[in-house]
Amino acid sequence: MLNSLLGLFSMDMGIDLGTCNTLVCVRGQGVVLNEPSVVAVKKGTNRVLKDGTAVGNVAKEMIGKTPGTITAIRPLMDGVIADFDITEAMLSYFIRKVHGRRSFVMPRVVIAVPSGITAVEKRAVYNSAERAGARRVYLVPEPKAAAIGAGLPVAEPRASMIIDIGGGTTEVAILTLADISVCESMRVAGDDMDAAIVNYMKRTYNLMIGPQTAERIKIEIGSVAETDQELTMEVRGRDMISGLPRKTFVSSEEVREALKEPVGLIVESVVRSLEKAEPELAADLVEDGIWLAGGGALLRGLDQVINQATGLKVQVCEDPLTCVARGTSIFLENLNEWKDTMESDEDDL
C-alpha cells in the first residue's frame, strides 16, 4: 500500500549513469534530462556548492578553471562509481530536478550499468540510488539497454550485435532471445581518446591542453578514416617550455594518428567477440551487420574502420547518444514483463 501511495507522487525513471553524461528518461516522456556527470565541491570536502545546484552543466563549465578552494569532480570513472558520496549528491539533484525540485519523491529507478562491473560496484550503485531517494532500483546491462533503445529485435531467436562506446567503457555485445550471448566490456572509450589527443599535443607541439579542449578537437575535426577534405582547427593551451599561453593549428590527419591506439583496441575487442559467436549467430550477422551506439559512434570513419576489420555492414543507430537511456525507458514501460530478467536491490534481501 505504501509503495502504491508513493507511486502516485513519483515519476518512475530510467537513468543512463555515464562517466561523461547522465541521461534521465521518464515513462511516456522520453529523455527529460541530459547533463554532464560533474559535481563542484569545496576542496577537501564532499560538500556540494550552492545548496547542491553546482551539478551537471554548471559544474562542467568549472573544470580546469576553479580557484584553489573549489574542485570540479567527475564521480564516475570507467563507467563505475569512484566517489560514493558525490554520486549520491549528483543523483539526488537530478531526481529532484526531474520532479520539479519536490523533496518527497521516491521513484522506482532502472539504471544502466556496464556489463563487466563487479558485485561491489553494483552494490555502490544500489546504495547511491537508494540514498538519493529511489524506493526500488533495477540494474540492466548497458549493451542490452542500448540494443533495445535502438529498436533491434533482441527478443527474437536471431543475432543482434551492438557496440556502445561511452566515455568510460566500450561494450561489445551479441544478443539473442532477450539476453546477451557474447559480451566484452573494456575500459577504453571516449576519455581514452581525449587523453590520447592530450598526449599527442604534448609530444608533437610541447603544448599542454585540458581534457575539454581535447574533447572539442575530437568532436570538431576527429576522424579515424581518410576523408575527402582534411580539417584544421586552432588549438590554444600552455607552452610546456616557456610556460606561456600559446596557440597552434592541428589537422584531422594528426588527430587520426593520435587516436590509432584506443580505436585499435576497440576494433580488436569487436573481432574477439565475433570469434566467440556461435556459428548460427555469426550467420545472422552476415545479413544484419553491426550497430554503433554511444557518443563514440559519432566519431568520423569509425564505421568504415570496423567494416574493414570485420567485413560486416556497420551502421550508426538513430540518435546514438540516447540509445541507452531510451532502452531504460522501455524497460520501465514494460517493467512487469522485464523485471525478472534484471538485477534488483530486492535480490539481496
Image (cartoon, rainbow, N blue to C red):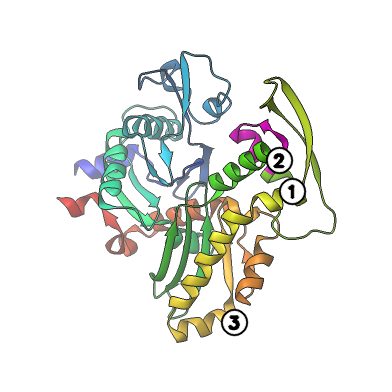
Q: Is residue 346 left or right of residue 104?
A: left
**Left or right: where 41 falls relative to 4:** right
Residue with the most extreme left position: 349
Tag 1: amino acid: Glu
The residue located at (67%, 20%) in the rendering is: 243
Q: Is 208 a magenta residue? A: yes
Q: Are marks 1 and 2 in contact (CB under 8 Å)?
A: yes
Which residue is nearer to you in this view: 166 or 13?
166
Foreground of the two, 235 or 119: 235
Q: How many marks?
A: 3
Magenta-span inclusion, residue 55? no
Reply above or below: 65 against 340.
above
| Chain-order first, disc 1 or disc 3 | 1
Report the Cα–Cα distance between label 1 and label 3.
Answer: 35 Å
CA–CA distance in space, label 1 to label 2: 10 Å
**Span highlighted in magenta in the image:** 205-217
- Picture coordinates of residue 190, whole percent (x, y): 56, 48
Looking at the picture, tell me which residue is in the foreground, 71 or 164.
71
Q: Are marks 1 and 3 in contact (CB under 8 Å)?
A: no
What amino acid is labelled 2 in the image? Thr
Residue 287 sits above or below residue 146 on the image: below
Residue designated by label 2: 204
Is 31 above or below relative to 155?
above
Residue under label 3, please give it. Answer: 287
Which part of the image, by quadrant, shows the N terminus? top left
Where residue 114 sits in the image (x, y, percent)? 40, 54
